[in-house]
Amino acid sequence: MLGNEYKEYCKKFNAVWKYISSCSKDLDTIVGEVCEKRLYFDAEDRWKSILSEVGVAFVSNDICDYSRFSGDEFKDLALFSEDGYFLLNERYIIPVRDMLGNIIALIGWYPDSKKYITTPSRFFSKDCLFFGLEQLSKTGLGKDYFIVEGIFDSLHLRAMGYNAVACMGISVSRVKELLCGLFRKVVAVPDNDSQGRRVVKNDLWKLPRNGSYLRWVGSLDMGDTEESITIKDIDRFCSLFEEDDIKEVFNSCFNSKERIIKLKWRL
């Protein structure tokens, strides 16, 4: 019976996504806005490709009739707050999919104090699922994968041709540990902050035996100047360097037998 309930749940989410997409700003506008807000310079073609692949929408209540999804039939999708406000209004919305590509939740991003809002849906938990697992239906099992924290970290890597999934946070449950067994080699890149460094130091993500952590070392040296900056995450790192240079570093990671691979870079 659970199988039928899940299928019905996915069917409703697909209907919601189809309607939201029909009301959304066009893809070119969204890509331009996202690149501007996230400081992706000269990267619109790359981001148009990946956002077109995963799906993205931006809607507001003046063009979208959210009330069609406010009844009891859609209650288990958890799209609304207690006071009836659509949770993802005026946010860039990206669907979360299961391994078969079914939509099971929605994530809304905007550069405000909340940044990310995820629908607390019945069949979805960030503790039990990676963002991006639908890639398995295309790549098959036993492939190399990056594991990162944020969805834009993973999307940036995917836009460069890598397989990547996101934890959607810092925690990794036993379920996620087991999911890592679907990959051949895992290279994990937590954010470059105190929590991320603790993950690497104590192996908090419990990587498979052949897995590796990519550890940030110091600040980014700005070449001949005396300036240096701290790179927050893989998304920011990828936005600062040429793709060929980045790939030279990343490709070697999957051949490394080191548990912790140190990453230090110079502009």
Image (tube, rainbow, N blue to C red):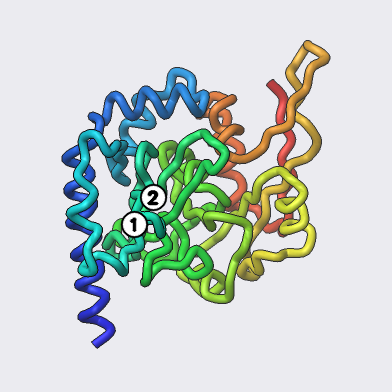
Looking at this view, name the residue that lies furthest to the front: 83
Which residue position is annotated with label 2? Answer: 87
Packing grade of label 1 (10 A; few <14, some 14-19, many >=20) is many
The residue under label 2 is which amino acid type?
A: Leu
Q: Nearer the viewer, residue 139 or 59?
A: 59
Residue sitting at 37 percent across and 71 percent down?
122
Which residue position is annotated with label 1? Answer: 79
Q: Is residue 49 above or below residue 176?
A: above
Q: How many marks?
A: 2
Q: Which quadrant, please, contains the C terminus?
A: top right
Based on the displayed image, in which of its 4 quarters is residue 134 positioned? bottom left
Query: In terms of secondary structure, where does tag 2 sit?
Result: loop
Query: In terms of secondary structure, where does tag 1 sit?
Result: loop
Residue contact between numbered discs 1 and 2, judged by CB atoms under 8 Å: yes
Based on the displayed image, in which of its 4 quarters is residue 161 positioned? top left
Q: Is residue 215 above or below residue 78?
A: above
Give how far across and how far down residue 222 sits, in percent. Answer: 74, 19
User: Is 106 on the left or on the right of 228, as rendered?
Assistant: left
Give how far across and how far down residue 263 sits, in percent. Answer: 71, 40
Give how far across and how far down residue 109 sits, in percent. Answer: 45, 41
The residue under label 1 is which amino acid type?
A: Leu
Q: Is residue 21 above or below residue 240?
A: below
Give how far across and how far down residue 162 sits, in percent. Answer: 45, 45
Q: Tag 2 or tag 1, which sits nearer the N-term?
A: 1
Q: Nearer the viewer, residue 172 or 137?
A: 172
Residue sitting at 24 percent across and 88 percent down?
1
Q: Is residue 224 above or below residue 261?
A: above
